[in-house]
Image: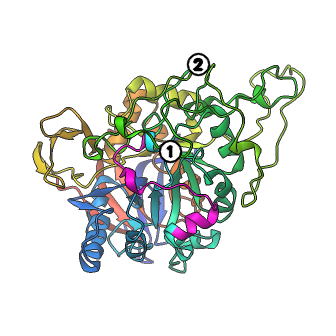
Amino acid sequence: MASPNGLVCFTNCLIPQEDGTLIEQDVWFNEQSGIILDAQLNGAYNFDFSVYESDESYREGMKMVAERIIETGVTSLLPTLITQEKALYPKILSLLQPFSTSKSATLLGWHAEGPFINNAKRGAHASPFLLPAPEGTKSFEDIYGAQNLAENEDWLMSGGGQAGVRMITAAPEIDGVMNAIGELSKRGIVFSIGHSTASSEVATSAVRYGAGLITHLFNAMPQLHHRDPSIIGLLGASPHLSSPLSPLPPYPPRKSPTSTPNGSVPAAIYTDILHSSEAFDSTITPPLSPFNYASPTSTTRSLSSGVVTPLKMSRSELHLEKGQVTDMAFVRPFYGLIVDGIHSHPNSVRLAYSAHPDGCVLITDAQKILDPNLRDGTYEWRDGQRFVKEGYKLYLEGTNTLAGSVVTMDACVRNFSRFTGCSLGEAIKCATFNPAKCLGLENRKGTLRPGADADFVVLDRQGRVLNTWVKGKEAWAKHL
């Protein structure tokens, strides 16, 4: 219902709150009154953000994806650029700037996934293009371009800021990466741990220095081990380990028996990058044996370009307050989850959510074949390869090798509710408020707070998209 002053009212609604509850009430809005946000999208509708042919075709592809993705309920997204040849970054980054039209999702900048990742967990990233960061932050500036790295004020999105890098996925154990985390985080860039073999100590140090997210949890990282839970263990980080009474010495970083100091792996165990999923492991994770620890390295040296998070010491004595968790020395990071039932088992999804519900961020990590209207079948990929789509499963023709995700965000929300047993409102929170808060945008995106952008999606009570609104106007509606 519209009023003479331009306000629009929805009646008999269940409105999601920031804590995941649903409240039945009417809602009024105008252009200043946002919802589903995908923080990791590699492409869609046969366009790949990591493939450049010409400026014109790239701009057309960006616009097409932004205008069509709203049918899945997504109103904001971070296009993801995987590891490239160094010379291609300036060309692509000059195009991947914040962008939107009157009837499109907002491209918030871009997510740089690589090249500062571990070769042993590279997935579909091209091994020859992976790099260390020997000069810390300067190495990141040299690759991405200092002018492309976001500053805090760029997140306001009001002045059409030109800086493009909003999120960086890197492996903290790679030479020089730990040195850059503090400065990048201070600038407002989200540092995400991913494609990494980091031990528990290294992963914890990265969070202490400012890392705020884990990229596609469970994929391209060591699997959970009870003696060294590694990156996954951050979800259950124990305050005891920072207590002065802890009898356990901190674990020093471990060295993989199959890795060289810069994270590379011998050629004998390379896997063809065309035959591996971007999120899945390309090599078998080395055993996490407690007898395989090396002496302390990167986490004990001076981090000249980083800012150390002040240590908040845990209580030195046991307390008697039921339900009160002992003070933590750091804030647990957010974590991205691909909830297609393929990249992570439903039990794993529920385990993660049970451990850290407020940190869950739903992502699609979808490839260019993403299209909810595309039928199952065989399709061209690249370099003469073809892939087969069967529902949400995408694999290379003639193999069982997964080639990425084709799940839509609205399907992730429905799956998440089914897998975890949580309410639809709680699942919606993981695709709206949580990612917006992770990016520091909760006053503009992912909420219905006064003054937030009037970008939102209307779902039925089964979580299916009925229509999507952009800037206070209906931009897409399902044909009934």
Judged from this view, the residue extending furthest toward the right is: 317
In depth, the one of 430 and 164 nearer the eye is 164
Q: Is residue 47 highlighted in magenta?
A: no
Of helix, strand and loop, which one carries label 2?
Answer: loop
Q: Is residue 139 magenta?
A: yes
The image position of residue 137, as x and y in percent, is: 63, 63
- Chain part drawn in magenta: 121-142
Q: Are dots 2 and 1 in contact, CB under 8 Å? A: no
**Hey, what amino acid is under mark 1?**
Gly
Determine which residue is flagged by label 1: 194
Q: Position of residue 126 (x, y in %)?
A: 35, 52
Residue 23 appears in the picture as rendered: no
> What colouring does the structure picture have?
rainbow
Placement of 365 over or under 77, stated as above or below: above
Q: Say what amino acid the circle numbered 2 marks.
A: His
Binning the other alpha carbons within 10 Å of mark 1 as few (below 14), some (14 to 19) or many (20 upward) gives many
* Secondary structure category for the residue under label 1: loop
Residue drawn at (48%, 32%), measured in percent from left and top?
258
Residue 361 or 266: which is nearer the viewer? Answer: 266
Give the CA distance from mark 2 to mark 1.
Answer: 20 Å
In the rendered image, residue 231, in percent from the top left (x then y), is placed at 57, 35
Residue 388 visible, this angle: yes
Q: Going 64% across and 68% down the picture, which residue do you hit?
A: 152
Q: Which residue is mark 2?
A: 226
Label 2 neighbour load within 10 Å: few <14, some 14-19, many 20+: few
Residue 166: x and y in percent read 52, 63
Report the side of 219 relative to 315 (left or right). left
- Which residue sits at x=35%, y=75%? 101
In the rendering, which numbered label is found on residue 373?
none
* 179 to the left or right of 170: right
